[in-house]
Image (spheres, rainbow, N blue to C red):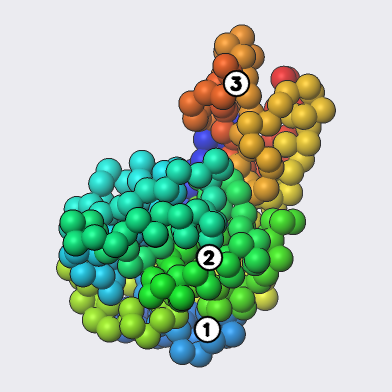
Amino acid sequence: MYFFVNDYNDIGRDDILDALVKAKDEYNTGYGFDKHCENARALMRKALANEDLDIHFIPGGTGANVVGLACGLRQEESILAVRTGHIEGHEAGSIEATGLKIETIKSEDGKLSRKLLEEKYSHYDNEYMTVPRKVYISNTTELGEVYTKKELSEIYDFCKENDLYLFMDGARLAHALVSEKCDYSLKDLANLCDIFYLGGTKNGFLYAEAIVIVNDDLKKHFINLQKQKAQLMAKSFIPGIMFETVFAKEDGYLEGARISYQMAKDLASGIRKKGYDLAYPFESNQVFVKLSPDELRNWQKIAQFETMGEIDGKTIARLVTTYRTSKSDIEGFLSQI
């Protein structure tokens, strides 16, 4: 049975596990004030080409979205996001539980654009409406799409022109950065948004994400907000060790994602050659396929994957690759479909 359900299905990369075992007899201070967290931050600032970044380690993606979106906002303010955004339908109202409202925008795909922002924002001019203050995007999107530098720049320019903060959900940011569609690098990220995070959970870590704060307005009392929202770990040195390990190597943060992307590319190409249609263009480590009822039943006999609604009268199957997906996995699956 081939496994394409998600990209967080194993314990973690061997180099990370080795580093944790090596450190098992250490004594470390807590809450991110240890030598591993400090070294990880230094390595990450170097990789991101910005020494002024505040970096905080968070257990997982939902928590990163909660504190990353709540910081710097007042209760009457709101967050703009597309309807397919992860925070809208996949996080059990965690954002609304902070007292903030998500104002959704209809998009024909999973992306936000300057044009969509302009149209939506123009309606918020009355005292009986919320006051938009932060814009949410995910990169990759829920449909596996990757933003180009031009698209990000246009969105960020609009945000700066209208006193809005831009937040980038980076749960799969490593997979975006290795995509053939991506025309920017880690070093560009701090110039394209106010706050973002580098995902670990979906990139071979045991868990954890690293929130990176660019805008000084959002840095004040962030660690207090972290604590209040139950996102400040006593044993922060564990994610510190994980991020320290991968960023100590050149391209270390992206090496697993590169494998994942190549396997997904081979998978998407092979599926098309077998006569199946993709539901959405291939851009990252998520492959979406249209399947008839019979095709779906046959595929489910040989592989595990999720279904994501319907399109053109067919079920959408989502297949996700990881750094552990092998050529034999792809070739074996393709031979059976």
Horizontal and vertical percent position of residue 333: 70, 27
Q: Residues within 10 Å of mark 1 (few under 14, many from 20)?
A: some
The amino acid marked with disc number 2 is Ile
Furthest-bottom residue in view?
51
Res. 234 visible in picture: no
SS for callout 3? loop
Q: Which of the two labelled residues, at mark 2 and mark 1, occupies the earlier sequence position?
A: 1
Left-right relation of 301 to 206: right
334 w.r.t. 192: above or below:
above
The amino acid marked with disc number 1 is Arg
Figure quadrant of the N terminus: top right
The quarter of the displayed image where residue 183 is located? bottom right
Q: Which of the two labelled residues, at mark 1 and mark 3, occupies the earlier sequence position?
A: 1
Furthest-top residue in view?
294
Figure quadrant of the C terminus: top right
Residue that numbered label 3 is attached to: 312
- Inter-mark Cα distance, 2 to 1: 24 Å
Between label 2 and label 1, give the one nearer the viewer.
Answer: 2
Horizontal and vertical percent position of residue 144: 58, 46
Residue that numbered label 1 is attached to: 45
The quarter of the displayed image where residue 32 is located? bottom left
The amino acid marked with disc number 3 is Asp
